Amino acid sequence: MTTSSSSSSASHNAPHSALPRIAVLATGGTIAGSAQDATSTAGYQAGVVGVGQLLAAVPALSTLANIHAEQVASIDSKDMSLALWTTLAQRVNKLLASDDIDGIVITHGTDTLEETAYLLHLTVKSAKPVVLTAAMRPSSALSADGPLNLLNAVSVAAHRAAHGQGVLVAFNNRIHSARDVVKTSTFAVDAFQSPEVGALGWVQDGRVEFQRRVVRPHTTATEFAIEATANDAWPAVEIVTSYAGVTRVMVDALVKDGVRGIVVAGTGNGSIHVSLQQGLADAVAQGIAVVRASRVGSGHVMHNGAASDDALGFVSANALNAYKARVLLMLALAAGNPARAALQDVFDLY
Ligand code: SIN
């Protein structure tokens, strides 16, 4: 295993030439969290345990892969930033371009994991496996879930069948596509689900099985490049929610602030309270892209054409939740300034 951070690099054991070479990029999260005592699974600090310690807790990794480890960040993922997204995606692309790396595992906090995973799904430029994993219990907890999730993630990243499947999430023995997966529980160890379509497959005791393949374009087949967002060029896109009694105050404030896009987490099939809807229609008239998603948590948002979307200038988010729709909208706006019909095509495709 080799470990490195921005300041240091060290070799810990002799590499086994027959094993796949997997880079483990650590970013923090509960998987790297620590509490005062082993019975505490909620009162802990995320992102305080280094990547070397995470790997040392799983000696069996050395039978699966030659590990190259890097500490990219040490954050609670609630604080994920656009700048760190750029750094992480660029690092992933650089490592995967090397003949010395066969796949990547990223350890991450669970809170924004689905957003980072989808961002990478659209911007990684390689067919080599990229697998995110995390934990619901800190590393110090009784029955911590991180070590097994890490072992399983490396098993998936080292497996031929994971090639060309886009970015994957290995969690609680399941393998999910970055596009489909969402966090669905605040505390349970089976927190990640793909509510609409189910998991892609499973991993257990080193065995990796895919039951279906990813059909929508991703990674090398997208028009998106992380370089378009470098140097703080991320277009400002925010999210508003529709609910009983909502007003247009927040939309008007966002328009005044100069956002380029707004995603609305609507009720049901992306329906929007009449007050909010008028604010959003006025935003469209000022050249702001408005995308309708749903706050429901599963299902897709149908484009309702002439009845509403075409008349008001809205784009429907298909099966993306509001957080993933925001990622796609930012990338689409960074790649150019697509007209509404072209933006709808982007949401129907990805
Ligand atoms: C985080 O997202 O960094 C904290 C929560 C977690 O990883 O479960």
Image: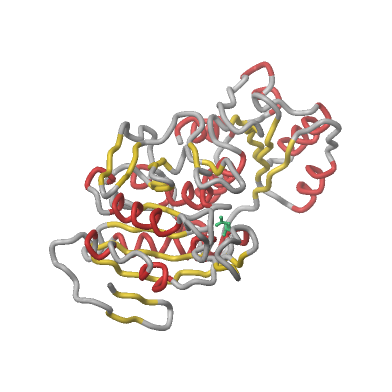
Residue 4: % across, % down: 37, 77
Q: Is residue 170 above or below residue 227?
A: above
Q: Is residue 13 above or below residue 145?
A: below
Q: Residue at x 30, y 66 (%)?
A: 59
Task: Please indicate whether residue 148 sits to the left or right of residue 42 in the image.
Answer: left
Tell me which corner region of the image, top left, top right, bottom left or bottom right, holds residue 321: top right
Task: Please indicate whether residue 241 sits to the left or right of residue 291 in the image.
Answer: right
Q: Which residue is drawn at 63% across and 58% down?
A: 42
Tell me, what colour scheme is on the image?
secondary structure
Residue 302: % across, % down: 58, 22
Q: How many marks?
A: 0
Q: Which residue is drawn at 80% across and 33% down?
A: 276
In the picture as drawn, the residue positioned furthest to the top comes out as 307
Task: Please indicate whether residue 328 sits to the left or right of residue 3 in the image.
Answer: right
Ligand 1, by image quadrant, is bottom right
Frontmost residue, 22 versus 221: 22
Residue 277: % across, % down: 77, 30
Residue 236: % across, % down: 65, 52
Quarter that holds the N terminus: bottom left
Frontmost residue, 265 versus 161: 161
Frontmost residue, 62 versus 25: 62
